[in-house]
Every structure is written in C-alpha cells, then in structure tokens.
Image: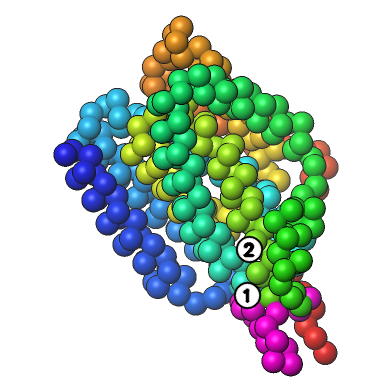
C-alpha cells in the first residue's frame, strides 16, 4: 500500500512536470540558450531530489539510498549518451530550433522502451537467478566498450533501423522547419528530421540495453528502477542544451563511467558471495564521477579540439 501511494505521487509529478515542460518552459520552437537550459536542469534535478526525500521518508533510508544511487548511475550514463546525440545532430545538420522537438519524441520513446526492458528484465531475473551473472558480464563488456570505442565515429547511415526506414518511405533531402513530413507534388515525403528521430530511437534502445543492467546492480525493486530511470530521462533535453558547448570539457568522464559500470558488474558477479551495501555503492559512484569531472577540469587538453557547431542546413534557392 505504501508503494501504491508513491506510484500515485510519481505519476502526478511526471504528468505535471511534462506538461510544464511542453506548454510553459518550451512552448515555442527556439534555440535554447545555456542559461535557460541550466534552469531546466535545476528544475528536473530538484524534482528528482524531492522524490528521493519522499521515498526516504515513506520507505526508509535503504530504499531512499537505492533510488539516489540508481538515479545518479542513470544520469551519469545519460551524459555520455549526449555525445551520440550531438554526433547525430551534426551528421544530419539538424536546425538548432528543431532539435528540441526531436529530443522530445526521442525521450517519450525512451520512456516506453525503458518500461519494457525494466519490467521484462526484472521478471526474468527473479525467475532465472543466473541472469544476474550474465548482466554482470554484460556490464564489464560495456565498461570495456566505453573506453575502446570512445573515439569511434557515429555513422547513422550504417544503422540498420535508418537503412530500413529509407527503404520503405520516401525521404527528401531538404528540411521543412520542424516538420517530420511534407508533401511534394501530392506525395508525402519524410524530412531528414524524421530520419534523425529514427536514429535517436534506435540509439535509445541500445542505451537501454547498456544502462538498465547497471541499475539492476543497485536494486531489483521495479518501482525504484523505473522511477529513477524516468527522472534521469526527463532531464535529458535540458541536459543536452546545457552541455552543448561543453561536451569536450569532461574528457575523463568516459573513464569514470567505465569504472562505475565495471564496479557494478563485479557487484553482480559476487552477489551470492558478498552483498556490497547500497551506501558504499553510492559513495563509489559519486566519488568516481566527481573525480573524473574534477580531473577533466584540472587537467585539460593542451590542444582542445573545437566542438562542432550545429548549423542549420542551407535553404533551397
């Protein structure tokens, strides 16, 4: 019954927050400046922290720390995912005023996909305990992949979902404002904005495969796993625009994230031998992420590559 109350509060906060974001904060398509984005980041983080306090008060310290740890893990992984979004927007030359619309629909899709992965994953783990070891190995591989492929260029045209979309629908090479489709000579064509959305949704599924197992290393409580994921996802749009000009500042973040994933993977592999307390996990996550960000600030590159500028595509003459 206690969690029923928390579910009601979560749904209410989620709906109200989303409505504010859609119809108050960003009701008009426009280029979001950094200061506005930072205010939105603060808004979403404040909501998450308020919910964390509520969980602590209602369900106790243990569940509260589980939520906070899971939220920090997901939010930290989201920062790394921003690099991929930046690469996609640059590759498709998405107009800056249209990026918020793509991110909105991408995030709504991520909410659905995460729900499927989380509840299906928990049901499988509870029935087949050995899957925890499989998830542990997956996280160790993901940790390795983060470092080994951090310089790999993202090529959306190689994405099978994007190639499939191009095979079945007509695609025009020119943008039409913030529209996903437009008509030419009576025929409906998808704009490059729709193909960008398809690519981002495909990436969302890949992110879910990587990040959901990381939260399973913190808790298998479906309420904690899902709510922490959703609060992290809801702040993605604001986080993207807040970090748009600072993506290459935190060059050591990828190493911090990979160690976090490796730590959680090992935690899953030894779960039957020793249970690492949630408070210890929280300290490790905060310490590693904080240290990697601090190292990035104190030890910048001598020759910093300039971040790509997201420009609007040339208009038809």
In the image as oriented, which residue stretches furthest toward the bottom? Answer: 185
**226, 249: nearer the viewer:** 226
Relative side of 91 to 30, left or right: right
Considering the image in quadrants, where does the C terminus appear? bottom right
Seen in the picture, residue 307 relative to 22 is either above or below; the reply is above
- Residue 122 falls inside the magenta stretch: no
Q: Residues within 10 Å of mark 1 (few under 14, many from 20)?
A: some
Q: Which residue corresponds to the image point at 30% horizontal and 32% vertical from the top-left?
A: 64
**220, 51: nearer the viewer:** 220
**90, 185: nearer the viewer:** 185
Seen in the picture, residue 315 relative to 243 is either above or below; the reply is below
Measuring from the top left, give residue 81's x and y in whole percent. 62, 46
Between discs 1 and 2, the one toward the N terminus? 1
In the image as oriented, which residue stretches furthest toward the top? Answer: 273
For the magenta stretch, what is the residue range? 173-189
Q: Are marks 1 and 2 in contact (CB under 8 Å)?
A: yes
Residue 211 visible, this orientation = yes
Considering the image in quadrants, where does the N terminus appear? top left
Give the SS element for disc 1: loop
Q: Which mark is residue 90?
A: none
Q: What residue does disc 1 label?
A: 180
Which image quadrant is residue 102 in? bottom right
Q: Which residue corresponds to the image point at 62% horizontal and 75% vertical from the top-left?
A: 180
Measuring from the top left, give residue 175's x and y in whole percent. 71, 78
Measuring from the top left, give residue 169's x and y in whole percent. 71, 72
In the image as oriented, which residue stretches furthest toward the left? Answer: 1
Q: Residues within 10 Å of mark 2 (few under 14, many from 20)?
A: many
**242, 181: nearer the viewer:** 181
């Amino acid at each position: 019954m206690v969690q029923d109350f928390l579910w009601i509060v979560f749904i209410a906060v989620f709906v109200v927050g989303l409505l504010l974001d859609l119809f108050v904060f960003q009701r008009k398509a426009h280029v979001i400046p950094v200061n506005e984005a930072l205010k939105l980041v603060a808004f979403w983080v404040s909501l998450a922290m308020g919910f964390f306090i509520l969980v602590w008060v209602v369900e106790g310290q243990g569940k509260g720390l589980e939520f906070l740890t899971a939220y920090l893990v997901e939010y930290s992984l989201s920062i790394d995912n921003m690099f991929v979004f930046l690469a996609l927007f640059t590759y498709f030359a998405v107009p800056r005023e249209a990026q918020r619309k793509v991110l909105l629909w991408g995030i709504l899709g991520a909410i659905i996909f995460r729900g499927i992965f989380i509840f299906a994953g928990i049901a499988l783990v509870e029935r087949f305990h050995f899957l925890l070891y499989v998830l542990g190995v997956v996280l160790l591989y993901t940790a390795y992949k983060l470092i080994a492929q951090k310089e790999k260029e993202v090529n959306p045209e190689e994405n099978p979902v994007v190639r499939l979309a191009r095979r079945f629908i007509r695609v025009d090479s020119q943008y039409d404002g913030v529209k996903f489709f437009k008509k030419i000579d009576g025929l409906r064509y998808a704009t490059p904005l729709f193909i960008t959305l398809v690519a981002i949704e495909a990436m969302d599924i890949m992110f879910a495969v990587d990040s959901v197992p990381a939260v399973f290393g913190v808790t298998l409580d479906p309420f904690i796993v899902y709510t922490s994921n959703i609060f992290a996802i809801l702040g993605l749009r604001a986080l993207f625009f807040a970090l748009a000009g600072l993506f290459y500042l935190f060059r050591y973040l990828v190493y911090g994230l990979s160690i976090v994933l490796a730590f959680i993977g090992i935690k899953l592999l030894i779960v039957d031998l020793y249970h690492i307390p949630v408070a210890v996990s929280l300290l490790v996550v905060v310490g590693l992420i904080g240290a990697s960000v601090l190292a990035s600030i104190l030890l910048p590159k001598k020759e910093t590559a300039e971040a790509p500028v997201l420009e609007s595509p040339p208009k038809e003459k």
